[in-house]
């Protein structure tokens, strides 16, 4: 796969729920999305930056969504679903995958900001389509399958001063 160069077109897809829960669990801190976006773009041409978020009617979530937009992310918002047995679910795996596949003909690189191993198959598909895939997350909670499937992996735990607030 091609080396990184300034004319590469990059799409950044951030699984906000995955990043939030991991940062909270490991460090009791939040993600610095500005630094994450800067690292993922790495001097290349940003085509799209998408943040996948879940609306849970928490008081601070609207300001978080606004902050993501101010940083340069388009927010894709999904309502949390509560099932009859009381369980709740709201994940973006299918939505992120569809967006990545749709963007593939228009970019050289897709930066997946998640540790979810379900995206390993997506990495292999994008590679088959000629797209470089980079993964950004905390190594302690990132699937080995995802790390192996991506062309490059950036461990956010290696530079918490940069990637955490």
Image (spheres, grey):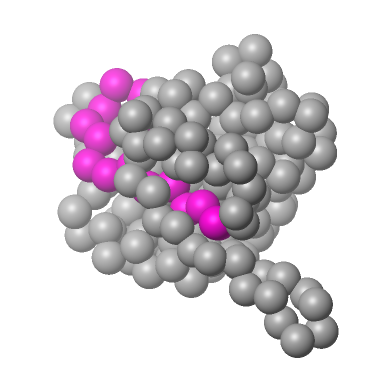
Q: For the point 60% across and 30% down, which residue is it?
A: 31
Q: Residue at x 71, y 35 (%)?
A: 23
Q: How many discs mark residues in the rendered view?
A: 0
In depth, the one of 17 and 141 nearer the eye is 17
Res. 156 image quadrant: top right
The residue lying furthest to the bottom in this view is 84
> Residue at position x 40%, y 56% from top?
76
* Left or right for 140, reference 153: right
Q: Residue 140 lies in what quarter of the image?
A: top right
For residue 132, say whether it is visible. Answer: no
Query: Which residue extends farthest front?
Result: 59
Above or below — where is 159 with respect to 93?
above
Span shown in magenta: 41-55
| Quadrant the N terminus occupies | top left
> Is 127 included in the stretch rendered in magenta?
no
Report if residue 28 is visible in the image: yes
Is residue 102 left or right of 31 when viewed as pictured? left
| Quadrant in which residue 39 is drawn | top left
Q: Main secondary structure of the magenta part?
A: strand
> Which quarter shows the C terminus?
top right
> Where is residue 157 drawn, in percent x and y?
70, 26
Q: Is residue 68 above or below residue 52?
A: above
Q: Nearer the viewer, residue 138 or 64?
A: 64
Q: Which residue is farthest top?
A: 161
Q: Is residue 52 magenta?
A: yes
Image spot of residue 130 (x, y percent): 30, 56
Q: Is residue 120 left or right of residue 105?
A: right
Q: Residue at point 28% right, 58% down?
A: 104
Measured as percent of width and height from the top left, residue 109 is found at: 33, 45
* Image position, residue 123 (x, y; %): 48, 59
């Amino acid at each position: 796969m091609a080396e990184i160069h300034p004319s590469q077109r990059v799409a950044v897809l951030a699984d906000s729920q995955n990043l939030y829960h991991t940062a909270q669990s490991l460090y009791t801190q939040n993600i610095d999305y500005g630094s994450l976006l800067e690292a993922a773009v790495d001097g290349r041409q940003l085509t799209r930056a998408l943040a996948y978020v879940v609306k849970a009617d928490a008081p601070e979530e609207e300001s978080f969504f606004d902050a993501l937009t101010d940083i340069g992310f388009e927010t894709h918002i999904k309502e949390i679903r509560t099932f009859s047995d009381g369980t709740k679910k709201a994940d973006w795996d299918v939505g992120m995958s569809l967006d990545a596949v749709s963007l593939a003909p228009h970019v050289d690189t897709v930066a997946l900001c998640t540790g979810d191993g379900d995206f390993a198959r997506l990495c292999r598909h994008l590679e088959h389509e000629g797209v470089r895939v980079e993964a950004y997350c905390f190594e302690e909670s990132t699937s080995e399958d995802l790390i192996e499937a991506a062309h490059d992996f950036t461990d956010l735990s290696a530079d918490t001063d940069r990637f955490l607030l």
